[in-house]
Image (cartoon, coloured by chain):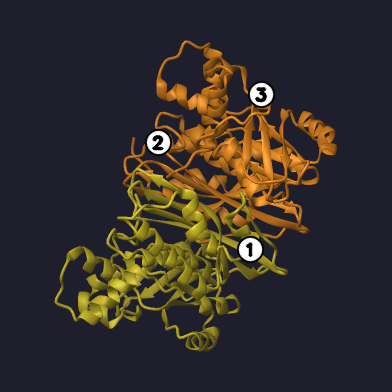
Chain colours: A orange, B yellow
Amino acid sequence: MSRLSEFELIETLFAPLATAPGAFGLRDDAAIIPPRAGCDLVVTADTIVEGIDFLAADPPDSIAKKALRVNLSDLAAKGAEPFGYVLNLSLPHDFSQARIEQFARGLRDDQERYGIGLLGGDTGTISGPWSIAVTAFGHVPAGEIVRRAGAGKGDLVFVSGTIGDSAGGLALLKGGASDMKAEFENFLIDRYRLPDPPVRFAQRLRKLANAAVDISDGLMADLGHVAKASAVHIAVEASRIPFSPALKSLWGEGPDAIVRAATAGDDYQIAFTAPSGNEAAILKAARDNDVVVTAVGRVEAGDGVSLLDDNGREIPVPRPGYRHF
Amino acid sequence: MSRLSEFELIETLFAPLATAPGAFGLRDDAAIIPPRAGCDLVVTADTIVEGIDFLAADPPDSIAKKALRVNLSDLAAKGAEPFGYVLNLSLPHDFSQARIEQFARGLRDDQERYGIGLLGGDTGTISGPWSIAVTAFGHVPAGEIVRRAGAGKGDLVFVSGTIGDSAGGLALLKGGASDMKAEFENFLIDRYRLPDPPVRFAQRLRKLANAAVDISDGLMADLGHVAKASAVHIAVEASRIPFSPALKSLWGEGPDAIVRAATAGDDYQIAFTAPSGNEAAILKAARDNDVVVTAVGRVEAGDGVSLLDDNGREIPVPRPGYRHF
């Protein structure tokens, strides 16, 4: 099968994704993001790279979705409503036409799912693996962005979803066959390939949360970012961290498993702090959006983050999160 | 010399570049771009990759500047005033601390030169060469963006600067020693490493030009984009295309040299069309900004682009511009 040229590929696969009027169908040097009255524009960027953030054997449509969702997760953590994105795509010289088509289908599906459109970008080749840099945009009512700074002493600390599933999925993909139930195995692998950030729920947090962060480096590391930005201490109760039945089946529920899951990263859920008086409203907002939210700790005077056992003793966390280098 | 970790590197080298209040010193998941009253936000993105857009031996500060300027060139072509940028940086596993520091200095210098600030991004490693994806932002008064579409029959076609210098520089860098004057050689190599888009001049084109494009793929290919978007034919007179004395010294002035220069790309100058009645104002705006502007052709009914010799005969152009694949 012959392969499309750069311009044919953009015209055939990507231009149909440029649905916003300001994207000019990708037929210009740049796009326009018109101002939305009363709103600030929120911008974030995250790159995913083959061999690090996804595996060569992952289906290309799920790679596309992961590239978008790791960014939608950042927007969600800020309470922003997603609007659009720019795509910088670097392909290995021998990329296949079929894979790029499947990749574009993944983008299209998630554009519909999240109500976003492609605004621009570029496509080139690299002497290396697939690399997908996305810059994503969302809107928040002016001044209502949820910051990492803002956690107040006495706040409760919440997380959405379950923690560690993606790391479990990656361990399965790297480790080969397991003796787990196929259903559990598929669930964990799916969580690695396809993050599910709570995009709609998170917009309710603008009025309810004091601080928020997306869990990408690892729960403990990301709460560390909140603690530092807010100049507070965050105490997490290990036994409250929500784990899926599948992950419990893979790693058990001992302290080692908890530390591993809470420091692995790649969760793309939201951790946030809020006054205890907001707990009922938060749980209602979560139910309204089919999201599970769990209180896992509290904000105190001090600095840093600690993980506590049921007796209030600190569990050592040698490495709170993932680092690229 | 020990190397900084990912977070130390961001805090030490990149956070000081996040000068806009909405960048939160890179200490959050996202940045805010507040609306500018009466303006549209213009967004563009371009990636440069080692071995394709720059060479491993290029000084890291000039690599940083090239990464910014290829994007500022797109903003200039739209008449936008640059505001800020997001940086997705992929480094090889063995990148050196000294090179990344020099890279950050290059960013800082160009931030001052162009009045822009870093808004966010991410830094990771890749099993491959340096890859730098930039998404850049600028403002235009609402509705005043200069499009590729808009060229009108009877318009004159102009280019800023000189054409082909960057391609000449790359040829010198790849071909080894030449017998040219060192001054010419340095000029051409410098034009390859360090584009000089006419950022201030181009903002004057909002009121003067009907259509514009930045010359990145190659003059003939990029005018082809304008012709297609505007549904017109563009005729370029080969003998009017401006070449530097250095490039003439390298390649001569024959038809082959003209075709080579006008299809090589990487110029990061602006090609634009305007009614002939605006020519005097355009030349004044160019003088005001120390930019050289040359009329090279005209817009006619029809489609496509042609390159004409002094007798009005068409010079064949087998390949109008650069393609990544």
Q: CA distance from mark 3 to mark 2?
A: 33 Å
Determine whether, in the image, residue B214 is placed left or right of residue A224. left
Chain identifier of the residue bearing label 3 in the image = A
Residue A195 numbered tag: none
Chain identifier of the residue bearing label 2 in the image = A
Name the spot of residue B275 as percent of width and height, x first.
54, 80
Q: Is residue A158 above or below residue B99?
A: above
Q: Is there one chain holding both mark 3 and mark 2?
A: yes
The tag earlier along the polypeptide, 3 or 2, is: 2
Q: Is residue A65 above or below residue B241?
A: above
Residue A239 numbered tag: 3
Pointer 3 local density, CA inside 10 Å: few below 14, some 14–19, many at least 20 = some
Which residue appears at 14% of the width and 77% of the height? B179
The residue that label 2 is drawn on is: A51
Can you tell which quarter of the image residue B252 is in? bottom left
- Identified by mark 1, the residue type is Leu
Which numbered mark, 3 or 2, is in the foreground of this view? Answer: 3
Kind of element beneath mark 1? strand
Comparing B207 with B236, the one in front is B207
Kind of element beneath mark 2? loop
Name the spot of residue B183 as percent of width and height, x first.
24, 82
Which residue appears at 54% of the width and 35% of the height? A266
Name the spot of residue A305 as percent of width and height, x first.
63, 40
* Residue B142 can be seen, yes or no: yes
Determine whether, in the image, residue A152 is placed left or right of residue B3. right
Q: CA distance from mark 2 to mark 1?
A: 35 Å
Kind of element beneath mark 3? helix
